[in-house]
Image (spheres, coloured by chain):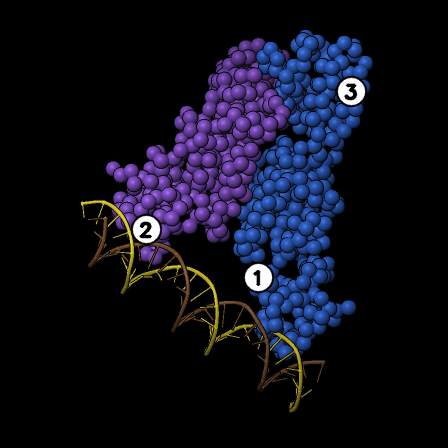
Chain colours: A purple, B blue, C brown, D yellow
DNA sequence: CTTAGCACTCAGTGCACGAGAGTGCTAACA
DNA sequence: TGTTAGCACTCTCGTGCACTGAGTGCTAAG
């Protein structure tokens, strides 16, 4: 259990370190953070805090920096985040100038806005296609043997793929088939579509079986979640300007992470409702160890979206949480109007 | 005019520097490149080459490195690139395992392959949509007031956008309109589409004019070239591992370039037919000054594609040209079968 | 024209040294 | 008993200095 004074000192260390990225000494705290104790007293307390694991010392003659446990305590108990002011919200709204019909656009814009305001990298993930329902399936011929397959969901998402018209299938019979499929399968969730389409095709004449199987194949592929296109990353350069990534090797590791959208989207998919903070080694992925994520998941109608602000463990948690919160409030208000 | 010996020395310096990224001294050349002259002789020649501007000296007591003029001379007169062997081509073909129906996929794959083989970054640009012709325009309703507009070109490209159904336009009349537009405009080039669609709409009843104008707007926006989606970049990390980008600031500058797809796609659009090499300050863009581009433009049927290998000015031009050439040969052979 | 020899230059490395920041501990104080 | 002042100690960092090695330019001889 920490005493009130220890908590105050821990908070001072964390906030100072977040701000200046340099180990904090007892003198600095004694002078700045309006505490009426001498440096020596603070030194004693800091030694205790270090013993308890909240602080660390890079080397004997340096100040202290927060450990991950220290950040965790700070985030859980000490962090004060200001309620979003109406003025700030209005400011945000004005930067969100035009109305977005597509959620994807809105997310993209929100990510850009957040990375700009926070100076960290922002990752956003839209809803998975499998939750949506089939609105229309269409095949459009390009020439004698090529066809574009287009699939539209009720959420307005469009997937398409070009394919070679399977042997022995005329464009006429394809059209017939399309009509039949649309009639039968409209409204099916995308998750169930692969199965449903196969069953439906099985009922159709045997002779063209092979051709239909090929078609199903394409639809299934089209429907498979494509993480890369789904994931939005903005402000990659922002986080790289943080002093912890001055080192070229660390920089490369981070860039590698951004090049693998599967990793990040996997992490974002596991997010819980609301705003959560994960610090350093709390992540499952070793790649994320030097990083912290402030993640927000939000429901917009039936659809889910997830936005995460990525920074070094020494990130400004209060600000990140505040900004994320504000953006969600904004989304909500936009939706209501 | 360079003597035969000077050319040999220049070539040796360039190739050595490309290989080891370190200034080349006269001794090294005398020893390695089978030249039967002493270091002193070579030193004299190198001094002359420096005076003529083909070589540079980082500081007095270092060896020489090629100047951009030196690289240019090397590329134009000294570089020998081996013809693509059938064996290598077969190797490439096997890594190009599945058949690509969509050019975009093929390009993406080619870029990945090239960056993997060359260890440089590869940028590829597919054909512009404006050259294609309208195959089908479709509006699909999602709910009472949202509609997805879908446009398909004869090259198999699909563009889509969600929009709010304009006031005073029923879904029925939209369907009518769609049919009419498809009948009239099918086969129009995308470049001409904006104009044509507007004229067509002008003929339709005045009462719904406003609604139609809104629709045209959307189609026009849909048709506007979207550089970001068009441009493929692979192997960003590859070039960053080159020693010239050890410096964090240079690294950031380069990453910045990759974050702005407009810049690169603009550069690629200006490429000439065939394979060209641009070195350092020969580029118009100051951002590209520390870089060289080996760019290939190739016609595939009516469609154009451009692929560029990006490296430091000290890049392996022979290898880059050879690889690019091989990929184009491969594309050609794939198309014929 | 070519080469050997030599003095010279300069980046890079290792080392010593002092300054500065910060600590831990002890002893005195309230 | 908690707080504070004082002081010796530790460690990083920057600077100056000497030394090394790679490479050059120039001169004179072959």
Q: At x 62% / y 58%, what residue is drawn?
A: B314
Q: At x 31% / y 39%, what residue is drawn?
A: A7
Numbered mark located on residue A93 in the image = none
What percent of the width, then of the height, locates residue A107? Answer: 55, 28
Location of residue D28 (image quadrant): bottom right
**Visible in this render: residue A111?**
yes
Who comes first in sequence, dot 3 or dot 1?
A: 1
Dot 1 falls on a residue whose secondary structure is: loop
Dot 3 falls on a residue whose secondary structure is: helix
Q: At x 57% / y 64%, what residue is drawn?
A: B22
Mark 3 vs mark 1: tell me if same chain.
Answer: yes
Query: Disc 1 to disc 2, how far (Cα)?
Result: 52 Å
For mark 1, what is the residue? B21
Residues at circles 2 and 3 in contact by the CB criterion of under 8 Å: no
What percent of the width, then of the height, locates residue B6? Answer: 70, 70
Chain of the residue under label 1: B
Nearer the observer, disc 2 or disc 3? 2
Q: Quadrant of the N terminus of chain B?
A: bottom right
Chain of the residue under label 2: A
Q: What crowding class fits label 1: few (fewer than 14 Cα within 10 Å), some (14-19), or many (20 or more)?
A: some
Residues at circles 1 and 2 in contact by the CB criterion of under 8 Å: no
Q: What crowding class fits label 3: few (fewer than 14 Cα within 10 Å), some (14-19), or many (20 or more)?
A: some
For mark 2, what is the residue? A39
Judge left or right: residue A317 versus residue B201. Answer: left
Dot 2 falls on a residue whose secondary structure is: helix
Frontmost residue, A224 versus A67? A67
Q: At x 61% / y 66%, what residue is drawn?
A: B58
For mark 3, what is the residue? B198
**Visible in this render: residue B277?**
no
């Amino acid at each position: 259990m920490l005493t009130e004074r220890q908590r105050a000192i821990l908070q001072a260390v964390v906030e100072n370190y977040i701000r200046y990225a340099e180990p904090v000494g007892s003198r600095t705290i004694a002078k700045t953070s309006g505490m009426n104790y001498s440096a020596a007293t603070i030194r004693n307390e800091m030694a205790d805090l270090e013993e308890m694991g909240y602080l660390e010392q890079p080397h004997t003659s340096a100040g202290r920096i927060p450990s991950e446990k220290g950040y965790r305590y700070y985030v859980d108990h000490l962090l004060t985040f200001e309620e979003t002011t109406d003025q700030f919200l209005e400011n945000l709204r004005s930067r969100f100038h035009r109305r977005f019909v597509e959620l994807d656009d809105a997310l993209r814009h929100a990510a850009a806005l957040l990375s700009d305001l926070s100076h960290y990298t922002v990752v956003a993930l839209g809803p998975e296609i499998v939750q949506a329902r089939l609105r229309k399936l269409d095949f459009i011929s390009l020439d004698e043997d090529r066809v574009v397959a287009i699939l539209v969901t009720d959420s307005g998402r469009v997937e398409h793929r070009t394919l070679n018209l399977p042997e022995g299938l005329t464009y006429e019979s394809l059209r017939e088939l399309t009509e039949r499929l649309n009639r039968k399968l409209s409204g099916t969730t995308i998750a169930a579509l692969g199965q449903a389409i196969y069953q439906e095709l099985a009922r159709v004449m045997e002779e063209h079986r092979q051709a239909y199987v090929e078609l199903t194949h394409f639809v299934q592929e089209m429907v498979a979640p494509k993480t890369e296109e789904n994931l939005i990353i903005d402000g990659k350069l922002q986080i790289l300007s943080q002093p912890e990534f001055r080192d070229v090797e660390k920089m490369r590791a981070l860039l590698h992470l951004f090049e693998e959208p599967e990793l990040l989207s996997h992490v974002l998919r596991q997010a819980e409702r609301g705003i959560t903070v994960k610090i350093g080694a709390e992540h499952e992925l070793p790649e994320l160890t030097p990083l912290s994520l402030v993640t927000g998941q939000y429901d917009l109608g039936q659809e889910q979206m997830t936005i995460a602000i990525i920074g070094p463990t020494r990130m400004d948690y209060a600000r990140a949480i505040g900004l994320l919160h504000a953006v969600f409030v904004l989304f909500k208000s936009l939706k209501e109007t």
